[in-house]
Image (tube, rainbow, N blue to C red):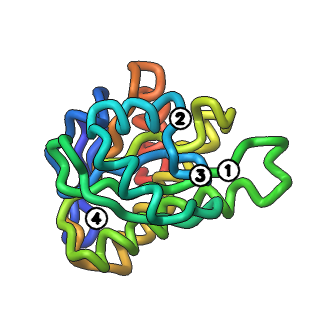
C-alpha cells in the first residue's frame, strides 16, 4: 500500500476488493441505468444486497460523468456513490473530460454528505475499455487537484483489482508527484 499526503488528506493505493472497504463510501463504476451490471457494478450489487438496487431504481439513472448516492445496504461502507464513466472509443470523443468528471462529481457528492473517506475503483477500465495507463493518470490527477482545493475528505483510496492495475497506478502516481 502506498500513502501520500495532499493538503490535509491522505491518498492511498491498495490492491483488493472494493466491496470489502471500510470507508464512509465506496464508488461504483456503474452504467447509466444504475440497475446493476458486470464487473465492479455487479460485485457491489451482489455484496450490498437488494436494498442498493431498490434505491437505484428511485434515482432514474445517471448520465455519464455524473454521480448519485445511495445507502450501502449490506456493505461495510455506509454509502455507495454511483458514477458513470465513459465508454472508450478513441479518446477523441470527450472521454478524458467525462472520466475526470466522474471522479470530480463523486468527490463533490462525498463532500456534500460530509463523508471523510472514499474508496474508488479504476473507473471505465473494465468493460468500458479505457486504457489503464491513460485512465490512471486522469484519475490520480483529478483527485490530487480536487484534494488540493477542497478540505473535508480525509482519505481517498484507490482499490485496484489486481497487481497489474496497482503497478500502473503506482507508476503514474510517482510520475505525477515527482
Measured as percent of width and height from the top left, residue 91 is found at: 79, 48
| Residue 86's disc number | 1
State the separation of the CA atoms marked 3 and 4: 34 Å
Label 1 or label 4, whichever comes before in sequence order: 4
Mark in the foreground, 3 or 4: 3
| Residue 6's disc number | 4
State the separation of the CA atoms marked 4 and 2: 34 Å
Measured as percent of width and height from the top left, residue 110 is found at: 31, 69
Residue 155 in sight here: no
Mark in the foreground, 3 or 1: 3
Q: Quadrant of residue 97?
A: bottom right
Q: Indicate the secondary structure of the residue bearing disc 4.
A: strand
Measured as percent of width and height from the top left, residue 24 is found at: 18, 57
104 is higher (above) or lower (below) than 150: above
Tell me if 100 is positioned left or right of 175 in this view. right
- Tell me if mark 3 has few (under 14), some (14-19) or many (20+) residues whose alpha carbon lies within 10 angstroms of its own: some
Tell me if 66 is positioned left or right of 74 in this view. right
Foreground of the two, 134 or 119: 119
Do the residues bearing badges 4 and 2 touch, measured as CB atoms within 8 Å? no
State the separation of the CA atoms marked 1 and 4: 27 Å
Q: Indicate the secondary structure of the residue bearing disc 3.
A: loop
Question: Which residue matches tag 3?
Answer: 33
Label 3 or label 4, whichever comes before in sequence order: 4
Label 4 or label 2, whichever comes before in sequence order: 4
Amino acid at each position: 500500500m502506498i500513502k501520500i499526503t495532499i493538503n490535509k488528506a491522505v491518498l492511498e493505493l491498495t490492491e483488493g476488493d472494493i466491496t470489502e472497504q471500510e470507508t464512509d463510501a465506496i464508488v461504483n463504476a456503474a452504467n447509466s441505468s444504475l440497475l446493476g451490471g458486470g464487473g465492479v457494478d455487479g460485485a457491489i450489487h451482489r455484496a450490498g444486497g437488494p436494498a442498493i438496487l431498490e434505491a437505484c431504481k428511485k434515482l432514474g439513472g445517471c448520465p455519464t460523468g455524473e454521480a448519485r448516492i445511495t445507502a450501502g445496504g449490506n456493505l461495510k461502507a455506509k454509502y455507495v456513490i454511483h458514477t458513470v464513466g465513459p465508454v472508450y472509443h478513441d479518446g477523441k470523443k470527450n472521454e478524458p473530460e467525462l472520466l475526470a468528471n466522474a471522479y470530480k462529481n463523486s468527490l463533490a457528492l462525498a463532500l456534500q454528505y460530509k463523508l471523510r473517506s472514499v474508496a474508488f475503483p479504476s473507473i471505465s477500465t473494465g468493460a468500458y475499455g479505457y486504457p489503464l495507463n491513460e485512465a490512471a493518470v486522469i484519475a490520480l490527477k483529478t483527485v490530487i487537484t480536487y484534494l488540493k482545493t477542497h478540505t473535508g475528505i480525509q482519505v481517498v483510496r484507490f482499490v485496484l483489482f489486481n497487481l497489474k492495475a496497482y503497478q500502473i497506478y503506482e507508476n503514474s502516481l510517482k510520475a505525477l508527484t515527482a
